[in-house]
Amino acid sequence: MATPLDISLLTYLLPVFVAIMIYVVLYAVLVRTKVLGESNSINAWVALALALLFLAMPGAVKFISFVAPWFVTMVIIALCVFLVFLFMGMDLAHIKKYILVDSTVMWIALMFSIVIVVAGLIATFGQFFGADATVQAGEIAPVNEIQYTFSNSRLIAAVFLFVIAVFAVKLLSGPIAMIKKD
C-alpha cells in the first residue's frame, strides 16, 4: 500500500548519495590539505575517481551508509554542546583554546569514532570476522556474540561511568580552565 511518506525508493538511490558524499568529503580534504597541489581540477578528478571506486564496491557503500549517520549525530551533539557553552557566556576563542589544549576531549571523540568504525565493520563485514554461515538451530554465531557484547547495557553503562570518571579526575586534579578570569 502506498503512503504519502513512503521513502523506500530512496534505498535504490543510496549508492548515489554515498558516492556524492564521498566525492564532497574527499574533494574538501584534498583542497584543504593541498596534498596533490594547488590545482582544483586534479583534486576534483582524484575525488571523483575514488568516489566511483567506492561506488563499485557494495560492501564499502554499506559500510559508509552505516557509519555516516553516527558521525553526523556525533557532530550535531558536539555542536549542541558548543552552543550551550556559547549561550552561557563563553567566547568562542576560549572554547577553541580549551578543546585544542585539553586532549581529553580529543581522546573521547577518538574513542567514540573507533567504536563507530568497529560497529560498522562488524555490521557490514561480520561474516569475515569468523562467523560461520551455516549456524545450526539453537547455536549463536560469533558475530551475534560480538554484537551482543557491544550492545550489552552493562558494558555501555560501564563505558559511560568510565567517561564520567575520566572527566571527574581531569577536572578535580587540574586547574579549572573553563572559568573566565576578568
Image: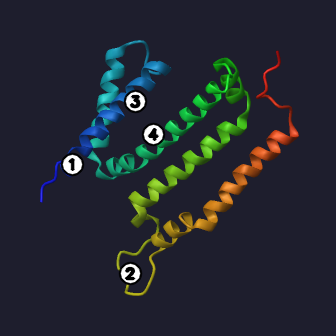
Q: Is residue 12 above or below residue 75?
A: below
Query: Which residue is at 82% across, 19% downward?
Result: 181
Q: Is residue 50 above or below residue 86?
A: below
Name, please, the residue furthest toward the top: 38
Q: Amino acid at mark 3?
A: Leu
Locate the C terminus and report the quarter of the image it occupies.
top right
Contact, CB < 8 Å: mark 4 with mark 2? Answer: no
Residue corresponding to mark 3: 26
Regarding mark 3 in the picture, which secondary structure is present there? helix
Is 137 on the left-hand or right-hand side of 86?
A: left
Which one is earlier in the sequence, the residue at label 2 or at label 1?
1
Secondary structure type for disc 1: loop
Residue 126 in which image quadrant: bottom left
In three-dimensional space, the C-alpha distance between marks 1 and 4, rounded to whole angstroms, equals 23 Å
Report helix, strand or loop for mark 4: helix
Query: Earlier along the polypeptide chain: callout 1 or callout 4?
Result: 1
- Which residue is located at x 68 percent, y 29 percent? 99
The residue carrying mark 2 is: 135
How far separated are the C-alphas under marks 4 and 3?
16 Å
Say the numbered circle drawn on residue 72.
4
Label 2, secondary structure: give it. Answer: loop
Q: Nearer the viewer, mark 4 or mark 3?
A: 4
User: Is 15 located above or below residue 147 in the figure?
Assistant: above
Which residue of the protein is positioned furthest toward the left in this rendering? 1
Q: State the residue at coordinates (61%, 60%).
A: 156
State which tag comes first along the sequence, 2 or 3: 3
Q: Please name the residue shown 76% across and 48% down the image.
A: 166
Q: Is residue 82 left or right of residue 54?
A: right
